Every structure is written in structure tokens, then in C-alpha cells.
Image: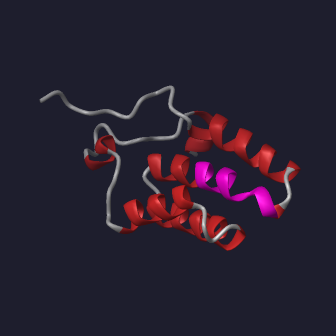
Amino acid sequence: MPKRTAPRNGPGSNGRSSCCSTLTRNSTKHSAPILTAIAFIIWWEGRGSKAHQFLELALDAEPAYRLARLTDQMIGSGMVAGWNMDKDGAYRPWGLEAS
């Protein structure tokens, strides 16, 4: 089986900053999808606890939002991205974010 490594061109900071920009332009009522996307990006980077915090915000905004519930269950069960299980292939921020 080939070794899994984190994609270099993944969602990372560009996706997160786009989502944050969109979040600031929307009402709290419609923030659950954006918060869920931010949570998924943060989980993808290997930070499950921080992702869970964003999912809590998403579920506070819209308790019935199913994608947030499913993502929270996935993270709560301990699932991690395959590349984050290998220290050599795990996600590492590039550029200014790395310091």
C-alpha cells in the first residue's frame, strides 16, 4: 500500500480564509454550513479539538444541520485523515503559518 502524504495544495489557509471572509458577511442564522466547512479544513490539518469547537458553533447556529452533526460524530469517534497518522506525511503548514 502506498504511503499517504498530506496534499500540498489542500484547502489549508486559503480555504479557511475564504470561509472566514464569507462568514463575516452572513448572518448567524446561515453560518452553520460555513462553520462546518472551516471545521472540516481544520480537521484535515490534524486539529480535531479545534474543529470540534467550530462544529459546536455550527450546531448552536442551526441544531438540525445534518452535515455538522455527521462531521462532529466522525471527529468524535477519533477518525483522522490518513496522512496525519504518519509523522513524515502529516500536514504541515507552509509559509508564514509554519512559524
Taking depth in this image into account, of 57 and 70 the one nearest to the observer is 70
- Judge left or right: residue 96 versus residue 43: right
Total numbered labels placed on residues in the image: 0
Is residue 31 part of the magenta span, yes or no? yes
Residue at left 46%, top 58%? 71
Q: Position of residue 13 (x, y in %)?
A: 63, 39
Residue at left 42%, top 29%? 7
Q: Position of residue 21 (x, y in %)?
A: 80, 44
Magenta residues, start to end: 29-38
Q: Residue furthest left?
A: 1
- Judge left or right: residue 48 versus residue 11: left
Displayed quadrant of residue 27 = bottom right
- Judge left or right: residue 97 versus residue 61: left
Taking depth in this image into account, of 10 and 25 the one nearest to the observer is 25
Q: How are the residues colored? A: secondary structure
Taking depth in this image into account, of 17 and 31 the one nearest to the observer is 31
- Which secondary structure type mostly characterizes the magenta part of the structure? helix
Q: Position of residue 66 (x, y in %)?
A: 53, 60
Displayed quadrant of residue 91 = top left
Q: Position of residue 6 (x, y in %)?
A: 38, 34
Residue at left 48%, top 67%? 49
- Judge left or right: residue 22 versus residue 54: right
Residue at left 61%, top 50%? 38
Taking depth in this image into account, of 56 and 1 the one nearest to the observer is 56
Is residue 9 part of the magenta span, yes or no? no
- Where 42 falls versus 4 (above or below)? below
Q: Quadrant of the N terminus?
A: top left
